[in-house]
Image (spheres, rainbow, N blue to C red):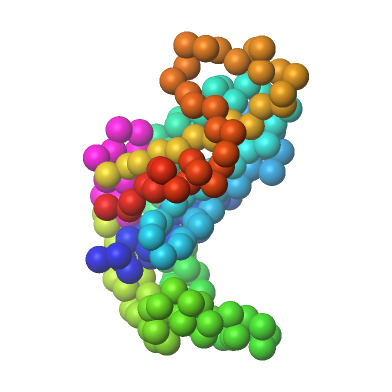
Amino acid sequence: EDLQLNVLLELYCHIFKGPFYHNMRTLKTLGYSPKLETQTDNFSLPLALTIQSTNTDPVDLDQEIENFLTNSQELLKEMTDVDFKKYLITHSDSYLKKPETLKEEFKRWWDAIFFRASDFCLKEKLHAISVQITKETLLEFIRTFILPGAPKRRRLSVHAWPEDELSDYDDSMEAKFISDPAAFKEEHVIPFQ
């Protein structure tokens, strides 16, 4: 099941990274470098949505991100089956792509060892899972993990404010200032369940 969740998250990113960039950067001009990406590690499957902005309040950016996540379900429902199949095939084929450099191949094998997976056929397994994904499966994943209020969603929002603008910070917001990021990370491991 963990492999299927990984495939679903990567497929979600594959489908929505373009619309996220277009919506946040082109249509709403909220900031620069909007990114929607996975940062898969051995313990969780985080979805990272990042926007750097000097002209939009971080709280407003948070709201726009939440709006986008909510709208992603509707965008997927409106997507034709032909378009969904194109995304699925492109994504599935990416698992079977041969390494272009010795460095890529080296990283693939050492990642399997480093993460103690010792699963040297992982890409083939991910491909086999990905070709079985349906639009309804992805919609259920969105309802369970992505949408605001989803039962298995965990959220961490990080706002980086310049020190000279901290006086503009709204004290009524539920927030914690982090002075030691390493200690915070140790205390707040967010398991993917």
Tell me what residue is drawn at x 46 percent, y 62 percent. 41
**Total numbered labels placed on residues in the image:** 0
Per the picture, the main secondary structure of the magenta-coloured stretch is helix
192 lies above or below 162? below
Magenta highlight range: 138-151
Q: Is residue 107 left or right of residue 45?
A: right
Q: Is residue 71 visible?
A: no
Is residue 82 located in the magenta-colored stretch of the structure?
A: no
Q: Quadrant of residue 11?
A: bottom left
Q: Which quarter of the image is occupied by the N terminus?
A: bottom left
143 lies above or below 43? above
91 lies above or below 138? below
Place of residue 90 in the rendered image (x, y in percent of width and height, measured from the top left): 50, 70
Place of residue 64 in the rendered image (x, y in percent of width and height, measured from the top left): 52, 28
Q: Give 115 or 133, whichever is nearer the viewer.
A: 115
Q: Quadrant of residue 103?
A: bottom right
Is residue 143 located in the magenta-colored stretch of the structure?
A: yes
Place of residue 37 in the rendered image (x, y in percent of width and height, measured from the top left): 53, 53
Tell me what residue is drawn at x 44 percent, y 20 percent. 174
Place of residue 168 in the rendered image (x, y in percent of width and height, measured from the top left): 65, 12
Q: Is residue 74 left or right of residue 167?
A: left
Q: Give 111 or 89, whichever is nearer the viewer.
A: 111
11 lies above or below 31? below
Q: Is residue 153 left or right of residue 69?
A: left
Tell me what residue is drawn at x 40 percent, y 78 percent. 116
Q: Is residue 59 visible?
A: yes
Tell me what residue is drawn at x 32 percent, y 46 percent. 145
